[in-house]
Amino acid sequence: MKVGIIGYGNIGEAMVSGLLKSDVVKPEEILASSRNEKKIRAALDKFHIGITRDNIKVTEFADVLIISVKPIGLANVLEQIKDHISDDTIVVSVVSSVEISEIESIIGEKKIARVMLNTPVMVNEGMSALCMNQKVNFEEVDELVALFKSFGLVELVEEKYMEIITAVSGTSPAYVFMMIEAMADGGVMMGLPRRKAYKLAAQSVRGAATMVLESELHPGALKDMVCSPGGSTIDGVYTLENNNFRGTLMKTIREATKKAERIKQKL
C-alpha cells in the first residue's frame, strides 16, 4: 500500500510515525507534500520518507491519499488534483466539518473516506472515527482500519454523527488537559511539588481511561469501586456533584457540537 499525505503538518507527522512504528508501510511507500521547508527537512532526517512540494505528484503516487489541510483550503487542493486521482485511489479526508458529498461535488464519485482524528495520535493514542462512501469496498475498509489503528483506536461510524464526535473526541483532549492541570494545581496547593503533581494526575487519568476501555465495566461501577464508605473519595465526588461537574461537561459537549455544526454550515 502506497500512502500519500497532502499537508504534512503535526498530524501528518504523527500519522507517519505510527505507520512506520507499526510496520504497516515502509518509508519508501510514503510520499508527503508540504510547503514548510522545516517540515520537509525534518521528514527526510527523521523518517526518510518521500517529501515534495507537489500535490499532484503525491496524488499520482498514492493508493491511499490522505488530505490534511485546513477546511478553508480543501476546495483549492481538490480542484488542483481532481484530474489526477485514479479510480482505484482511496481519498481520505481528515479535514473537519467537510462532508463526503462536498468532496464528491468537486472530484466526482471516487472512493472517499472521512476521518475525525484527535491530537493524541501524536503519541499513538489517538481516536479515529471513520466513515466512507459506497465506492469503498469491504476489503478497502479493512485496509483503512488497519492503517488508522497504527496510531490509536478506530471506530466505524455513520457520517451524520461526525459533528458530535468532533465534540466528544476531537475537542475533549483540551478539557482533559485542563482537568489534569487543575488536579495538579490542587496538589500543589496542598504541598506537592509541581512536577510530581503533574505526573500523579496525568498517570491517574491514563490509568482510569485504560480501565474503562479494557474492563468493560460501566464507568459508574468503576467509580463505586474507589468510593469507600466514609472515605475521602466520596467526599470528593460529593464536591464535584455539588458543583454540577457532570452537567457542566454534558453542556460543554452540547455547545461544542453546536459550534461544529455552525462551522460546517459556513464552509
Image: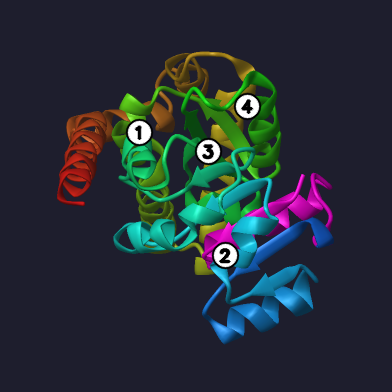
Q: How far apart are the alpha carbons under marks 1 and 4?
A: 18 Å
Residue beneath disc 4 = 141
The reply to whether discs 1 and 4 touch (Cβ–Cβ < 8 Å) is no
Magenta region, residue range: 1-27
Residue beneath disc 3 = 128
Q: Position of residue 202 (x, y in %)?
A: 54, 51
Q: Which of the two discs, 2 and 1, labels the residue nearer the N terminus? A: 2
Q: How far apart are the alpha carbons under marks 2 and 1?
A: 28 Å
* Nearer mark to the viewer, of 2 and 4: 2
Please state which amino acid type lies under the numbered disc 2: Ile
Q: Residues within 10 Å of mark 2 (few under 14, many from 20)?
A: some
The residue that appears at 74% across and 50% down in the rendered structure is 2
The reply to whether discs 2 and 1 touch (Cβ–Cβ < 8 Å) is no
Q: Quadrant of residue 60?
A: bottom right
Q: How far apart are the alpha carbons under marks 3 and 2?
A: 26 Å
Q: Which of the two discs, 3 and 2, labels the residue nearer the N terminus? A: 2
